[in-house]
Amino acid sequence: MPSILSIPTEIIIAIAGSCDTAGVNNFSQTCRVLHFTLTPQLYKVIDLSSHNAEIECVPWRFTESPPGYIFPPDFMRRRYNEFDREIFQRQGLLERTFAANHSYGEHVRTLRWTILDTNEMDWGQNLESNSEIEDAEAKGAKVPVYTPEDEPIWIVFRSLTNVTDVDIHWHRRWREVTLPGPLFPAMRSLRLGGCMTQKFVSCILEPQTTSGSQQSLLERVELNNLFEWGKINLPLPHEDHLGDIIHFARDNADDTTEYYRNHLMIGVLDPLIGRLGNLRSLGIGTFGDDDRPRVPILQSYIHDGLVYASLARVLNSIRPTLEEFKFDQGINRIEESYIESDGWITRESYQRRDHRQMDCLFLDHILPVLLEAPWPRMKSLHIRGVGCAPSIKYPGMEKISFAVPTSEKQRLKTLLGGEQDMVDFVFEEEQGKDWECLDMMGTGIPGFR
């Protein structure tokens, strides 16, 4: 097959030119059969993602990364690179192909996609320089702005009626321009990451909550540090087009308008509780606040408590079927170590509870569910980042305080299904990877922080 595919078009034309009518017909039929045979294989897997690539990325604040200060590709606060630009270009080509051939989507079984825009412009940003803008306005002309639409992406996504494995990471600096409607009715595996809106996530999960079957099809779910765009304390209009939202916010905002920071998304899987009878694998990776809870309680502690409580409810609901659970929490050690080494910040002495905020939330919500009853089908349990890892030193802290004692870990291991020696059990204080804090990403509405 590689030899056939490598034949230049000119040679194929030359071969056809030397054939009689019957030969040309046979040659044409052969190519047609190859087309119908290869098209399903060609589009079976669509991987147009940069967040899964093995590349090193430069943080926003630098043009070149200092030694040891390199971000992974699933971090949002990084610069686009050549690989991102290539992926974005290839996405555009695929969007045009699917716009002309909707039936190709029926062949896709795996989708890995990074929502990005490498044009280095915000939606609605002026395309001209300040002097050109002034000249255009003086002549009464409209100033051109950058307003790409999401519909080409949604055309691709809506056509994927048979896709079973979905991995989407939102890396773009603004939220969706329009909503796509219900997506991926045959989905069995879902991985989400980056910064999204609740409405967009609902479009992905809606077919799982409204299908005729009592149970969702989902067998595997992974939430990879899923944040939600910040909010404005304005009653935004029901219109779902980003342009309408921007105009409304501009007309109604004033100097006292409050902007709320980004937070971990609350209750992502709550609509599916009671319908996850097929779920076998659950993975949670999340940034955690490494401060100590204080009095008065910080708003972030209350918010993150709701996130952990929601995860605990979901975890408890899938006890009978769960075979694999992975939980990893932590901080961005890359940035923390760089900031502290440069002396940019100093930490005050910690008081109140001995453990970090994220550890307290795990102890209050997740651990009680894990220890409440046996896990009859559990084959693999990996928990990382629960406890104070000694990789970063905190002023005012004389010793490392482990959140979960060894006796509790051993007790948990006895609750796992099957022979204890056969269960893949990992419980480590050190986090498995670095997790990015996205609380300053903004509202995702251009012109509003």
Image (cartoon, rainbow, N blue to C red):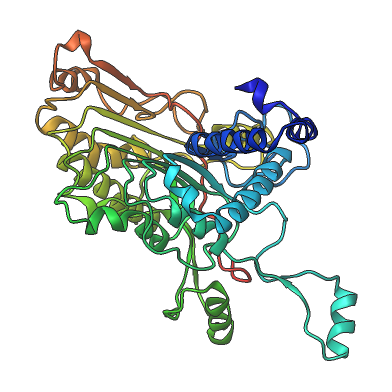
Image coords of residue 188 (percent x, y): 31, 41
Residue 353 placement: quadrant = top left
Q: Percent from the top left, x then y, of residue 136?
A: 86, 83
Between 361 and 188, the residue placed more toward the observer is 188
Residue 133 visible in the displayed image: yes
Residue at the limit of the structure toward the left, as seen here:
373
Quadrant, the C terminus:
bottom right
Going by the image, does 204 lie left or right of 99?
left
Vertically, is 60 above or below 196? above
Task: Describe residue 176's horizontal placement relative to residue 126 as left or right.
Answer: left
Residue at the extreme top of the image, as rendered: 421
Where's residue 48, x and y in %? 57, 41
Left/right of residue 418 with respect to residue 64 in the rendered view: left
Question: Can residue 79 be seen in the rendering of this structure?
Answer: no
Q: Please count the marks in the image.
A: 0
Q: Is residue 365 left or right of residue 339?
A: left
- Where is 100 relative to 289, above or below? below
In the picture, which quadrant includes the N terminus?
top right
Q: Nearer the viewer, residue 172 or 40?
A: 40
Q: Position of residue 381 (x, y in %)?
A: 27, 24
Residue at the image position 89 percent from the left and 76 percent from the top: 132
Image quarter for residue 190? top left
Nearer to the camera, 343 or 281? 281
Residue at image coords 22%, 56%: 211
